Image: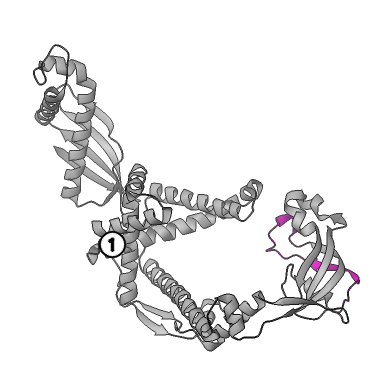
Amino acid sequence: MNIVVEKQPKCIATLSVEVPSSDVAAKRESISSTYASQAKIPGFRPGKAPKAVILKRFGKQISEELRDALFGEACDQALEKENLKVLDFGFPDNLNERPDGSIAFETKLILAPEFTLPEYKGIEVKAASPEVTEEELDTQLQSLRERLAEFEDVADRALENDDIAVVDFTSTVDGKPLTEIIGEEKGAYLAKRENHWLPIKEGSFLPGYAEQLIGLKEGDKKDVTITLDDEFPFEELRGKEMTLHTSVEGIKTAKLPELDDDFAAKLVPDKTLEDVKAMIRENMGVEKLKQINEFKVNQIVEHLTGAVSFDLPDEILQRETQNQANTLVEEGQKQGASDEDMVKQQEEIFTVATQRANTNLRTNFLLQEIATQEKISVSDADLLQHISKIAESRKEPIKKVIKDLQKKNQIQSIRNSMLIGQTIDFLLEQAKVTEVTAEELEAQATPAE
């Protein structure tokens, strides 16, 4: 078998194969013999049908199996000879069955990018302390107190900061009802509300609205005008002035529960305040550590992808870009965006999807190469344990889950995801971590003006 591999830019190669007639004849004879030994043909005992009968009955299947076998052998030899990392072998093309019995064909290979790994051990990262501070604990407790607050009516004074205003309002833009501009479906919530509870604090509901109600009393009316910024969810309203014709129907103030054992028992029966504090601190610590690790991983990925440059296969990039675009559209629809909104944001969606696809693919190729260098692998036992957890979460028998995953060709994808996770854990263990304050991290993340 004569094999020639010609590498091209953008991770593409052409595999040209010539199979001598003797090899073709030997392989055809082997496949035909297998059919002859297994075929059940009326009038002949199993395995005793003449070769001519077998070829006439199964000629098409034998030819297809022959081509598949020769293609597979050619790919195996190319991998060994050229030391290739092939992502996709494609399909045989320009198939030429010559008069002398030899066969020639070509196929396009999609190759993994070639690059030299940057230094990946001891990557310097910054992270905040995973310790939960008293201030953070107090903030969480205050939030829980507010959630369990009772509300009392206020009748003898005007609205103040941190009150709750009970309001009725209708909205107009340029003198027109809001629904005439953005439609009934999108405008219903903003166009008109009755007995709407509005916390009097900055940024509540619509920016600039609540603050303008301070000083009003129950029964007062006021037309409040606010300007909607360029980030407002509804494009038709960006930069426009909205007027909310408001009537204050009531004023309420929150009465927070005392921070004591009775309060703790409302959160977790039969627990003291100290018990609840310990539980909250533990849960916050777990969540904080998760966020810190995610931040570390982001820094590691940024370091790796910034340290080496390589081409990505166009077809793989296009496929991943489409997957990311589909995900963005699904996320938008879950948040209430219409098909019309998605069409208007098509260019923006494609830009973000392309950036995500680039980052994801580069990261995956780098991490897989690191896994190879460090001999990191996912054992069958670990894979089975992971699938067992999937089955448990679905409340389905593990055999059924395995069968479903095999049918969808997702087993290898799960193994790859686990491999990436183990490689990230390895990099985290090897990283040089400098502990800094949350303020320093925030300053680092904020671009200088």
Q: Position of residue 274 (x, y in %)?
A: 52, 86
Which quadrant of the figure contains the N terminus?
top left
Q: Which residues are magenta?
A: 215-239
Which quadrant of the figure contains the C terminus?
bottom right
Please say whether residue 234 is one of the residues in the magenta stretch.
yes
Q: Position of residue 377 (x, y in %)?
A: 25, 61
Q: Is residue 365 visible?
A: no
| Amino acid at dot 1 | Glu
Most distant residue in the front direction: 270
Compare residues 419 and 342 and report the one nearer the observer.
419
Up/down of 243 relative to 446, above or below: above
Relative horizontal placement of residue 10, taking residue 7 as reference (left or right) = right
Q: Position of residue 344 (x, y in %)?
A: 64, 50
Q: Position of residue 366 (x, y in %)?
A: 33, 63
Up/down of 316 relative to 156, above or below: above
Most distant residue in the top direction: 43
Q: How is the image coloured?
A: one colour
Please say whether residue 96 is one of the residues in the magenta stretch.
no
Compare residues 101 and 284 and report the one nearer the observer.
284
Residue depicted at x 76% and y 54%: 188
Compare residues 215 and 206 and report the one nearer the observer.
215
Q: Choose top left, top right, bottom left or bottom right for residue 302.
A: bottom left
Q: Which residue is mark 1?
A: 369
Up/down of 186 relative to 206, above or below: above
Circle 1: element type: helix
Relative horizontal placement of residue 62, taking residue 258 as reference (left or right) = left
Count of labels in the image: 1
Most distant residue in the bottom direction: 134
Q: Is residue 245 visible?
A: yes
Residue depicted at x 36% and y 58%: 389
